[in-house]
């Protein structure tokens, strides 16, 4: 049964224990859902800046924001993940506030930079924040619960945005204002809520894998380097649906633009409903296997596209829904395990900086992957899908190999008894 009384009680217990944090996550993510598809569209509709210039500004701002993930790691180690969560929400509020007054390229750049910088800081601090929140209890339980909340909130925000914009462009600015308000509200809630204690100086252990916790040791550790490589290679999974697949469906298969939100809705709905159940089902299994399975499932989507001719009608829509389901399953299996490893594998003294390195590697992979779209305009478009499959196979190998060299407490997801 998907919703047994025991599972329902566990979810309600989690909600009750951290109801204000859950509320902050809900409010913040609804705000993100309101504006997720609007970054470029907003400025094309509200400014006289040419589209080509806006695209260039967006690319440069995104690249310039990449180091913020690394700086966020330093901030997290120095002041704690909660401080980073507060700051990323305030940066988001500041960036989207600039959206409201942006009319020239300089302010447009500043707005996009702050929005991207807050995103980079968020991904550095979020994993560490959930680790502090778990306070020694199974990481995956807390991560899965909050990810399900986020998926539901993101979908809700996207629906509200779609309904608002259906009544005309005047609602654009109100969506931006709403995101500013929700970001500030989330920052206030995060600031007032306690988390678990950070174990900066753990007792000495006889475990041969334990280190003294220096950044030099982290950089020299083969497992840490392989995790970084795995994150770089798996980064394209974040943009595969709304970049490569959307371009294929709309431009090559001549499907309507609605295909992108439909695929997004399928994936987020499944994650909102089933994430906590899937995480319970795989508790106690090897995390490396779970992450590798998720990467291989994602890569498997590209394999039929190497040979498949353009589809149309019901066949095309069935394929789109199937892709959404596979991507959702891959994420539900692998994301909690990957974030658990990123939080627990590094020494506590460098946890924030380590997560910053891992997440920045993923962001670089996300930024570079769209360059491969050029293959779609050549005589060999299948090369894009071959490259995609190879990249995710490499991610599976990197993650699986990385975990072989880590202690059992990191390799295996602890069974969730609550």
Image (cartoon, rainbow, N blue to C red):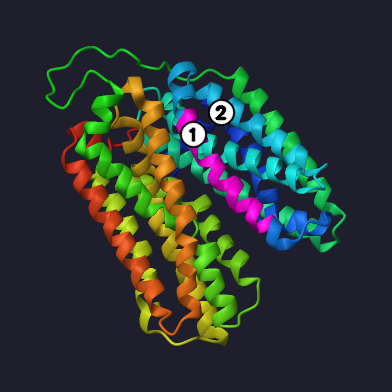
* Residue 383 position (above or below residue 307): above
Secondary structure mainly formed by the magenta segment = helix
Q: Is mark 1 on a helix, strand or loop?
A: helix
> For the magenta stretch, what is the residue range?
54-72
Q: Relative to residue 65, is residue 87 depicted above or below?
A: above
Residue 314 position within the rendered picture, expressed as x and y whole percent measured from the top left: 55, 84
**In the figure, residue 416 lies in which quadrant?**
top left
The local secondary structure at tag 2 comes to helix
The residue under label 2 is 85
Question: Residue shown at 17%/16% (left/top)?
Answer: 205
Task: Using the rendered image of the protein, determine whether residue 19 is visible from the camera's viewpoint.
Answer: no
Give the percent coordinates (x, y) of residue 237.
Answer: 43, 57
| 58 falls in the magenta region | yes
The answer to whether mark 1 and mark 2 are in CB contact below 8 A is yes
Side of 321 where 210 appears, left or right: left
Q: Does the magenta stretch include residue 165?
A: no
The number of numbered badges drawn on the structure is 2
Disc 1 designates what residue?
126
Answer with left or right where residue 47 lies relative to residue 242.
right
Locate residue 340, reporting x and y percent.
Answer: 35, 37
- Mark 2: give few (<14), some (14-19) or many (20+) Cα within 10 Å: many
Q: In which quarter of the image is the C terminus?
A: top left
């Amino acid at each position: 049964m998907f919703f047994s009384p025991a599972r329902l009680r566990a979810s309600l217990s989690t909600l009750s224990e951290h109801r204000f944090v859950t509320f902050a996550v809900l409010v913040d993510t609804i705000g993100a859902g309101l504006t997720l598809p609007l970054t470029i569209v907003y400025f094309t509709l509200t400014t006289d800046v040419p589209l080509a210039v806006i695209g260039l500004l967006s690319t440069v701002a995104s690249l310039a924001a990449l180091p913020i993930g690394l700086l966020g790691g330093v901030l997290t180690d120095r002041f704690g993940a909660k401080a980073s969560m507060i700051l990323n929400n305030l940066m988001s509020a500041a960036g989207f506030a600039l959206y409201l007054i942006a009319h020239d390229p300089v302010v447009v750049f500043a707005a996009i930079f702050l929005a991207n910088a807050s995103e980079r800081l968020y991904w550095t601090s979020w994993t560490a924040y959930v680790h502090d929140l778990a306070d020694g209890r199974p990481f995956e339980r807390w991560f899965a619960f909050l990810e399900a909340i986020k998926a539901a909130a993101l979908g809700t925000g996207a629906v509200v945005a779609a309904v608002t914009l259906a009544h005309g462009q005047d609602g654009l600015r109100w969506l931006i204002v709403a995101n500013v308000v929700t970001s500030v509200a989330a920052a206030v809630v995060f600031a007032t809520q306690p988390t678990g204690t950070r174990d900066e100086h753990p007792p000495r252990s006889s475990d041969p894998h334990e280190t003294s916790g220096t950044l030099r040791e982290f950089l020299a550790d083969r497992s840490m380097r392989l995790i970084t490589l795995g994150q770089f290679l798996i980064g394209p999974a974040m943009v595969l649906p709304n970049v490569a697949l959307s371009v294929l469906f709309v431009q090559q298969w001549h499907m309507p633009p609605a295909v992108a939100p439909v695929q997004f809705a399928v994936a987020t709905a499944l994650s909102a409903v089933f994430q906590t159940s899937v995480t319970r089902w795989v508790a106690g299994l090897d995390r490396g296997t779970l992450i590798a399975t998720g990467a291989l499932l994602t890569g498997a989507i590209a394999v039929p596209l190497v040979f498949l001719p353009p589809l149309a009608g019901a066949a095309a829509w069935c394929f789109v829904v199937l892709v959404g389901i596979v991507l959702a399953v891959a994420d539900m299996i692998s994301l909690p395990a990957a974030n658990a490893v990123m939080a627990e594998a590094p020494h506590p003294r460098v946890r924030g900086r380590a997560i910053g390195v891992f997440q920045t590697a993923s962001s670089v992979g996300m930024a570079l992957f769209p360059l491969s779209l050029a293959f779609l305009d050549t005589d060999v478009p299948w090369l894009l899908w071959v490259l995609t499959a190879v990249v995710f196979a490499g991610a599976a190998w990197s993650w699986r190999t990385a975990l072989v060299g880590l202690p059992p407490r990191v390799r295996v997801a602890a069974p969730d008894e609550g």
